[in-house]
Image (spheres, rainbow, N blue to C red):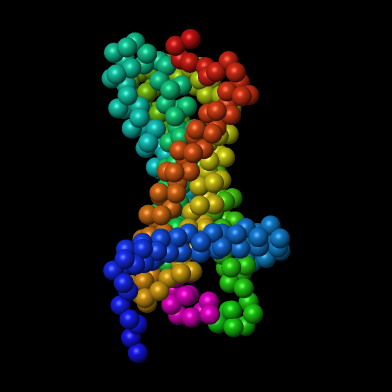
Amino acid sequence: MTNPPLPLALILPAWLGSLVVRLLAPVGDFTRFSLAVLAWTVASPRSWMSRRRIAPPIFTVGVASIPVVATTGMFIGMILALEGFAQFNALGMADRMGGIINSSVVKQIGPVLAAVMVAGRVGGALAAELGTMRVTEQLDAMQAMSVDPVRNLVVPRFVACVVMTPILTMYSNALGVWGAWAILTGLFGVNTADYWYYTGLVVHWWDPAAGLLKSVFFGAAIGLVSCWRGFNCVGGASGVGRAATSAFVTSFLAIIVINLVLAKFLNELYYVFFPTGIRSVLG
């Protein structure tokens, strides 16, 4: 028996209603998933603190990502020095580039790039791993045996992302600073003492602290988004591929949005604690 056609006056409201439901349903599902992950993380630390559960994701997310994150950070610092030297040298400020570049690296560029590398290398892998378990019904089998897959599979991976992303950010920051130093002093003849003097003058402890705080939120976003995409994977092998791709794309967008929001918030907070403002290379 087919449903009778809707009256003409109800077609547009019905279409708008279905559109809103389709748009908001994933938001609600992701919110419930995130709250469940956070609840298990806080309420049941024993579910992820055992070495057997936390060590593999820590290695996958953190240790195995060090080469790509560190290399990216180093080359970004070198590129900033290469591209910016001509302009700053024309202004007679080449010796002050260390402060300008390193302030940008530790506060903005380093954390964002490290998170993007983690999202690309780890986010897709997490989504593919959990997605494969979903399409092969391994997650359903765990639930049938009263084993919560969120508690046992998602929480350790989420914690690994939150813990290791700031550590990887420190590697990225350090290599970015040294990469800029190598180019400016080795290629352009900038005095090493000036490089580090202006770095110390401009880079306040707040800058790396703000970058590391951002990286905690970046890691949380990567872990939640990637695991959620894998958990909701459908469509067999092609669905696993779509889940891996969407995990990276969504994580990348989340990183950009979170960075914008936290940059504004932390800048305002800085002036609350330090009313005199930032220190400048201009003196």
Expressed as whole percent of the image width and height from the top left, the position of residue 221 reads 50, 52
Q: Residue at x 54, y 52 (%)?
A: 220
Expressed as whole percent of the image width and height from the top left, the position of residue 111 reads 48, 40
- 115 or 192: nearer the eye? 115
Expressed as whole percent of the image width and height from the top left, the position of residue 169 reads 51, 42
Q: Main secondary structure of the magenta part?
A: helix
Q: Residue at x 35, y 27 (%)?
A: 81
Residue 155 is left or right of residue 238, and the answer is right
Residue 265 is left or right of residue 147, and the answer is left
Q: Outermost residue, bottom direction?
A: 1
Asked if residue 262 is positioned above or below residue 204 in the image, the reply reads: below
The mark total stands at 0
Looking at the rendered image, the quarter that the N terminus falls into is bottom left
**Can residue 150 be spotted in the picture?**
yes
Expressed as whole percent of the image width and height from the top left, the position of residue 241 reads 35, 67
Is-magenta flag for residue 30? no
Q: Residue at x 58, y 15 (%)?
A: 276
User: Which picture quadrant has residue 145?
Assistant: bottom right
Is-magenta flag for residue 137? yes
**Can residue 242 be spotted in the picture?**
no
Q: Residue at x 31, y 27 (%)?
A: 82
Q: Which residues are magenta?
A: 130-140
Asked if residue 193 is positioned above or below residue 240 in the image, the reply reads: above
